Amino acid sequence: LYDSQGISPDMIPGMKIPDDFYARVSEKHEQKEQVAATKKKEEIKVGNLEATKALYFDDYKKTEFSAKVLKIKGDIVVLDKTAFYPTSGGQLHDKGTIGGAEVNNVFKQGKLILHHVYNANFKEGDTVKGVIDSDRRIQMAQHHTSTHIINAAAKKVLGAHVNQAGAFKDIDKARIDITHYESLSEKYLAEIEKEANKIVKKKIKIEKKFYPRGEAEKKFGMEIYQGGAVPGKMLRVVNI
């Protein structure tokens, strides 16, 4: 009920709520993201390859690209570069085709981006064309941005104590969990919706930039970690 309808357990009289309820919800969604090929404990041995160049940072509307096949191991394909977004940040991976073969899953393993491909008919060393499902990509990107806009709107309406406690973005819906001391009334929900729509209608220019971790923290504060810990020395900040 919480996932599908947004009904918090404290809204149901007599409901016993475990202390780690929201942690369990977050864990459940993390498990959903870890489909077959993303088992963290079973690292896929692909050898010592150069880091995959991620093309999706440059232009999320770019849904076609060419790349060289570096490694094929079973159904796993590693390219020298890719525009396929891997499952991360509460957002599910892109889908599409590589060399005409269906891409079922995309995930990161260290410095590499691995593609789970059905019935690949190409070989290592080939140059292949990648095509991403553009409708899915745009919808997921919009859902991802929307969660941050709603978070900002909620902070403005409810107060500075509001933080993101969890989030999940899929093709048909998205969800954001926020910290607050009571269930939201219809009045507050309407105010948050109104504030979020005001942000959208402003058509604010979006700045996308990589910062050294120290500089990012100094410029934006700890709010950049609301979605959880971010690995790496360089952080990509999307500033709306």
Image (cartoon, grey):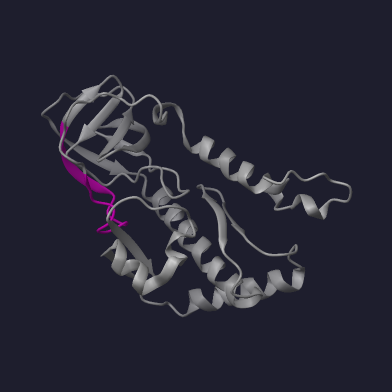
Q: Residue furthest right?
A: 14
Q: How many marks?
A: 0
Q: Which residues are magenta?
A: 53-69
Q: Is residue 206 visible?
A: no
Left or right, 60 with reference to 79? right
The quadrant of the image that shows the N terminus is top right
Decide if residue 42 is on the left or right side of residue 80: right
- Residue at 63% from the left image edge and 61% from the top image edge: 179
Asked if 181 appears above or below 204 in the picture, the reply is: above
Q: Position of residue 148 (x, y in %)?
A: 50, 64
The residue furthest left is 125
Q: Which corner quadrant of the image does residue 69 belong to?
A: top left
Q: Position of residue 201 (x, y in %)?
A: 49, 78
**In which quadrant will I find the C terminus?**
bottom left
Residue 204: x percent and y percent?
41, 77
Percent coordinates x, y for residue 231 in the rendering: 34, 50
Q: Answer whether residue 82 is magenta in the image.
A: no
- Identity of the residue drawn at 67% across and 76% down: 191
Vertical side of 145 occupied by 91: above or below: above
Q: Is residue 87 found left or right of 175 in the rendered image?
A: left
> What residue appears at the point 52 percent right and 40 percent down from the top-left corner?
30
At x 42%, y 77%, the residue is 203
